[in-house]
Amino acid sequence: MSGASAELHLGVACSGGVLQLALVTADGNVLESRVVASSGELSDDLDLALGGAPPNVRAIMIATDRLRGALEGSAPLARVATLRISGPVTDGVPVLASWPEQLLARVSPVTETVAGAVDGRGRELVPFDEEAAERFFGRCRGEVDALAVSSMFAPLAPEFERRAAAIAARVLGDDLPITMSHSVAGFGLLDRESAATLNAALTPLAAKMLSEIDAAIARHGSEAEVFLVQNDGTLAVAEVAASTPILLLEGVAASNVYGAALLADASDAVVLGNGPDRTGVVREGFVVMTSAPTRVAGVRLNVELPVGAGSSRVPHDLGSGSARRLVLDPQARGEDALRHSDVAAAYGCALAPVGAVAWMVSEGDEREAQRLHRAKQQVVELAITAGADPVTAAVTSIDAIDISQATNRRLRIRATGRPLIISRADRSAPSSTLL
């Protein structure tokens, strides 16, 4: 690949034995693109991508189905300790009770429930039993590779999880990866607990993937910043993204859909392709995500995935009369066909914004404005941590989702911004020990 622009982005999408590459300018002009067979090894694919890239590539954006394949296949997973802080409210439901036996055998979880509960407004009902948590962590010493912590209404009141993570770091050391459930999923204790446990199980594989990326960058003498594509099609700088691998499962699917809409200059679109990772919906410039629980590796989660990915179906009603029908197929002809459709995922990677999501409960009381203001500040800070330029990072959508049998609603707040592209050597990587 060649190019001489002041700022070039290289999009790399690896999925299903196919490697898509797109060299683009920051304003979206495709300088070169190609589709080749993937070796199946990320390091080899990156060597192929970087071997022909010009030296002035400033950013490399990568989407890969490697972690999803690891969960669905037989790749070794980390041994996980899962602590639930919810006693005595949920004592009748064992931790990870709904997991398939085969997956339980791969993760070999050590589990415990300790006292601690809050209500739907975040008010403490039962104090957190820190001594019981410390005893559990002591029993886990030398027996596990990663830790997951979950508590009731954690997206609204994460303090119990943070206190538990601090205790775990003291007992088990700073090197053990710790996933707090509010950092990876929304409301629903059991589904969020499963998401946190799967995230913890994937952290060693994500760390290995990050090492392979670093090694490839070093081999080719590149100073480019590296971003990974998340489930919603937005980016996070590689060091941050690797700490939440459960949010990287469907990056290729999201990039295909987002890239197709970009290629068509359409803010609302239904994208149809030959496979679930090439089908989905874009509304108001963002990939539409599932609001219902999803299943990954036979486990029910509340991690949002792109509509159309996996078992979720594409809705016909987008709520917009301007929605376009786009066909993501290189052989397609007519007004719905897309130029460069064979590299839609790589194109979507290269031009995606950095993004982050936070949740809050809307109660409509006198403190609503104050809570919303804090939530907006939080999600903008999360986006900046993920690699967004602070000058451009801003809240770009607030979606309300009704909670069953409740008078309040949950709000999904998204912030995005242009990638802050600096030399990898100059970026101080944040700690990923406590998520």
Image (spheres, grey):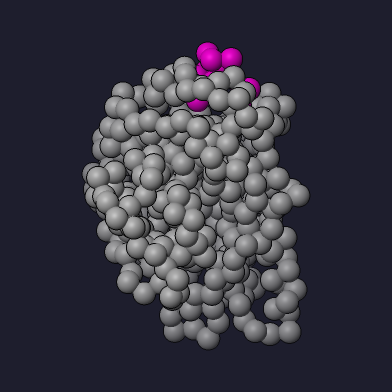
Residue at 47% x, 19% y: name it: 52
Instruction: Report if residue 195 is visible in the image.
Output: no
Task: Point out residue 255 in the picture as x, y percentages from the top left corner.
Answer: 43, 47
Q: Is 55 rendered above or below residue 415?
A: above
Please name the residue shown 51% across and 29% down the image.
210
Residue 426 position within the rendered picture, expressed as x and y whole percent measured from the top left = 72, 27
Residue 98 shown left or right of residue 129 in the figure: left
Question: Residue 240 sits in which quadrant?
Answer: top right
Q: How many marks?
A: 0
Q: Position of residue 357 (x, y in %)?
A: 57, 58
Residue 123 at x, y = what percent?
64, 73
Residue at figure coordinates x 28%, y 32% from the top left: 17
- Left or right for 354, reference 16: right
Magenta-span inclusion, residue 112: no
Region of the chain picked out in magenta, as a range: 213-224
Which quarter of the picture shows residue 95?
bottom left
* Residue sitting nearer the eye, 121 or 135: 121
In the image, 258 versus 130, the foreground residue is 258
Q: Nearer the viewer, residue 387 or 193?
A: 387
Rendered position, 64 above or below 301 = above
Q: Is residue 351 visible?
A: yes
Report the residue at 46% width, 30% height from top: 32
Please tell me whether residue 222 belongs to the stretch shown in magenta: yes
Residue projecting furthest to the front: 334
Residue 137 vertical placement versus 160 (above, below): above
Classify residue 268 as left or right of residue 222.
left
